[in-house]
Amino acid sequence: MIRGASTSLWIPLHSGQRLRIDITLSAKSVEIAAY
């Protein structure tokens, strides 16, 4: 789902954690955080 100029991708990992990728097109930056 794209909300405005940013989108969040949730990728399930084998360890049970989720890899959250926040992409902000306006800032042209990618923040990757593992939870």
Image: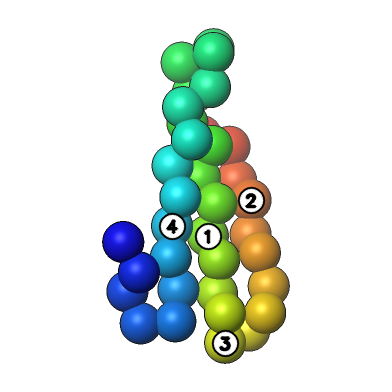
Work out how far the residue at label 2 is from the one at label 4, CA to CA, in angstroms: 10 Å
Q: Residue at x 57, y 87 (%)?
A: 26
| Badge 2: residue crowd in 10 Å (few <14, some 14–19, many ≥20) | few
Image location (x, y in percent) of residue 8? 43, 57
Q: Residue at left 48%, top 35%?
A: 11
Whether residues under marks 1 and 4 lie with C-beta atoms below 8 angstroms apart, the answer is yes
Q: Which residue is mark 4?
A: 8
Q: Which residue is mark 3?
A: 26
Q: Marks 2 and 3, how far apart in space? A: 16 Å
Residue type (three-letter) at the residue carrying disc 4 = Ser
Of callouts 2 and 3, which one flags the residue occurring earlier in the amino acid sequence? 3
Q: Amino acid at mark 3?
A: Ser
Q: Which mark is residue 10?
A: none
- Up the image or down, 27 lies above or below 22; here it is below
Given the image, on which type of amino acid does mark 1 rest?
Answer: Asp
| C-alpha separation, residue under disc 2 versus residue under disc 1 | 6 Å
Disc 2 and disc 1 in contact, CB within 8 angstroms: yes
Give yes or no for contact between labels 3 and 1 (Cβ–Cβ under 8 Å): no
Q: Closer to the N terminus: mark 1 or mark 4?
A: 4
Farthest-out residue, bottom: 26
User: Label 1: which residue?
Assistant: 22
Which one is earlier in the sequence, the residue at label 2 or at label 1? 1
Local SS, label 4: strand
Q: Quadrant of residue 15?
A: top right
**What residue sits right under mark 2 in the picture?**
32
Q: Is residue 8 left or right of residue 29?
A: left
